[in-house]
Image: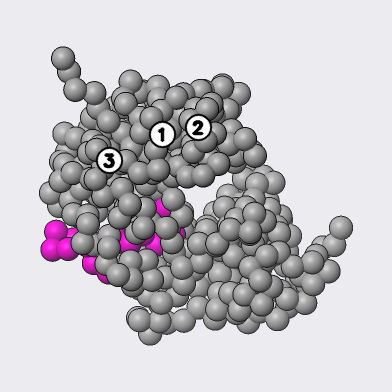
Amino acid sequence: MSVPYKIGVIGAGNIGTAMAALLSRSGAEIHVTARGARLAQITQAGVELNDRGEIITARPKVCEAITEPMDALFVCVKSQSLASAIALNRAAIAPSTLVIPMVNGLPFWFYASADGMGHVPLLDPDRVLARTLSPAQVLGAVLLMTVQTDATGKATSSNTPTLSLGAVSDGTDEAAVTRLIALLETSGVRTDFDPAIRQKVLVKLLANFATNALSALTGAMLDDIGRDPALRSVATGLADEFRAWASREGYSLPPNAWLVDLLIDAGAFPTSMLQDALAGKPLELDAICRAPMDRARMGGGDMPIMGALLDRLAHAGHTPVPRSDIPAILRSLPLSPIPAQKTA
């Protein structure tokens, strides 16, 4: 009797729900963690994803914490919850388990090598991740997928799920990665293995850095930021700060014209940080905003626009300000004169 391939999905929010539903088509045994009302929802009704009009339903095994080793573990929680999620699900991680953190922002493994995980203090202050995980078993991941869930936990996605994976150090089990990619492809997740995964992480983070905190403060959708002159001026100023730091790290990132086109093409979609702000949830400010700022300062640089933006966001209680306050707030940021903002 063959032993089933076991995939764990930690977290049943937007991305976790979508991944659990998609992976159910792979033939693997799927385990999902959830808590409280979400645990009850999945226990009763399973998970559901509307993938561009196709309804995918599945009944994965659901629990508060996985208590047996997985072949692959997708960690789909906010970056600030990553260390506690790994600690809670320690039994799911064997030496051979591939661990795929599906998080936004600068990842904790960004400076990993065969000698160790490296350290980004804001993201792993107590070194829980560094002590628990081997660099060889961690796969960097960049997921391009827009997902929202409703009050019943049903998820909806409007674009083809595309996932890039990459080893973060030497020693990764290539055969295990090949098998996982085959299962992902069978699930409908377009997947590639990219040796330059750090470059892809920074390209995605460039867009997140330029838009997430700005959207949480103003309530702007992605296409609003791309089209409105005042919002666009702030976003491109933030992108310039991020790009300057990345250049000092040895990475070349796309220009602002690429960013603006990306935002307009995204349409009226809220950033993940705006979704969290509207729901009263903690914001991923450390991974998306503060960690790059800290690294820039360590190298003798600075990010004054982001610093000022975070001050304004904190003053607003990490929720969008009234629309009438936005023009004055944007003009107060330390960048070149901002064009007059359009008003409805």
Precedes in sequence: disc 3 or disc 2: 2
Asked whether the beta carbons under mark 1 and mark 2 sit within 8 Å of each other, the answer is yes
- Reply above or below: 309 against 25: below
Is residue 321 at all visible to an observer of this figure?
Answer: yes
What secondary structure is marked by label 1? strand
The answer to if 108 sits in the magenta stretch is yes
x and y percentages locating residue 309 in the rendered image: 61, 74
Q: What's the residue type where badge 2 is placed? A: Ile
Asked whether the beta carbons under mark 3 and mark 2 sit within 8 Å of each other, the answer is no
Q: What's the residue type where badge 1 is placed? A: Val
Kindly report the distance in space between the C-alpha atoms of the residues bearing marks 3 and 1. Answer: 11 Å
- The magenta stretch spans which residues? 103-120
x and y percentages locating residue 162 in the rendered image: 43, 37
Q: What secondary structure prevails in the magenta region?
A: loop
Precedes in sequence: disc 1 or disc 2: 2
Res 332 → quadrant: bottom right
Say which residue label 1 marks: 62
> On residue 67, which mark appears?
3
> Which color scheme does this rendered protein use?
one colour
Residue at the (66%, 77%) spot, across then down: 315
Side of 1 where 156 appears, left or right: right
Kindly report the distance in space between the C-alpha atoms of the residues bearing marks 3 and 2. Answer: 18 Å
Q: What's the residue type where badge 3 is placed? A: Thr
What secondary structure is marked by label 3? loop
Say which residue label 2 marks: 42
Kindly report the distance in space between the C-alpha atoms of the residues bearing marks 1 and 2. Answer: 7 Å
